Image (tube, helix red, strand yellow):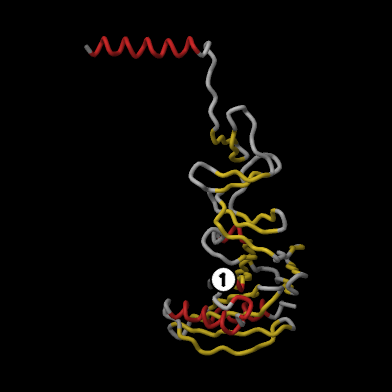
Amino acid sequence: MKFSQMKKVSAMILTVAITLGGNLISYADWKQDGLGWWYEQADGSYPVSTWYEDTDGSWYFFNENGYMISNCYRSIDSNIYAFGYNGKWTGTMFSDLQPGVWAGNNYSNEWSGFHLNIPEGYRIELASDTGTIENVETFVEFVVWAPDGSGSAIELEYADAYDYTNGTATTPEYVALMHGLRLSLEGYSIEGITNVQLGGNEYAKLSTRRHSMQKRELYCRKVGEHYFECVSVIYWPTGEAAINGLLSSIY
């Protein structure tokens, strides 16, 4: 009986093949080569410089050559979108924000008024190097590591005021306090929030300490229509001089 059923199935397959005239059926599918991933439609075409929604509801964007972009921020129609390592849009979008530009070791952002000339020997990590794009809702510009190998570093990021309950009424001091409360869950003690000058601008400065050794600070000020510029600092006693030298290079 099993043999008889197999014959029937084979006859059905043959009938379908004859009906289709021997033509092969093409299906839309993801493709990959040495340059990256793209999505090929059933007719052989592929999306270029446009969005694509996959069957699971995930959104992707393909560049001018038809390749999926990943692990980056991308300006699309005047907004900036964050894409993870797998190419999926993370759901995070930034409007009314302008990223800075690099010229060698000099970072400059005319929109926010933040400029930093990084001394020789420091290691620069752009957002795509930090592995944070798909895990945070802030716009990360860079991390700069001190040359002494202590793990001391500063990070520049922009946080949207609309992510806070009070929206544009949120103050830098409130952002600093919320940051401090999160750090307290990691064992840091809040030493205080003060107003300081950094690079000619006034910031709310959060100071915290853990185990009387490791220190973390946050410098925060409002920029643009609804953003906060946040300079996060982490250092140990051996890296304090290197961090102070870096902070003094902000102008």
Identified at 56% across, 84% down, the residue is 206
Q: Residue at x 55, y 31 (%)?
A: 28
Foreground residue, 11 or 146? Answer: 11
x and y percentages locating residue 90 in the rendered image: 55, 56
Name the residue that disc number 1 marks. 163
* Residue 146 visible in the picture: no
- In which image quadrant can residue 207 be found? bottom right
Question: Which quarter of the figure is the N terminus placed in?
Answer: top left
Q: Is residue 226 visible?
A: yes
Residue drawn at x 66%, y 88% is 196
Front one among 2 and 106: 2
Whether residue 127 is situated above or below residue 57 in the rendered picture: below
Q: Within 10 Å of the Cα at label 1, are there few (<14), some (14-19), or many (20+) other Cα atoms?
A: some
Q: Is residue 59 above or below residue 135?
A: above
- Quadrant position of the C terminus in the picture: bottom right
**Which residue type carries mark 1?**
Asp
Q: Is residue 90 above or below residue 52?
A: below
Given residues 39 and 129, the one toward you in this image is 39
Q: Position of residue 115 (x, y in %)?
A: 74, 73
Label 1 residue SS: helix
Between residue 65 and residue 59, name the one nearer to us.
Answer: 59
- Residue sitting at x 51%, y 79%: 178
Q: Position of residue 58 (x, y in %)?
A: 53, 48
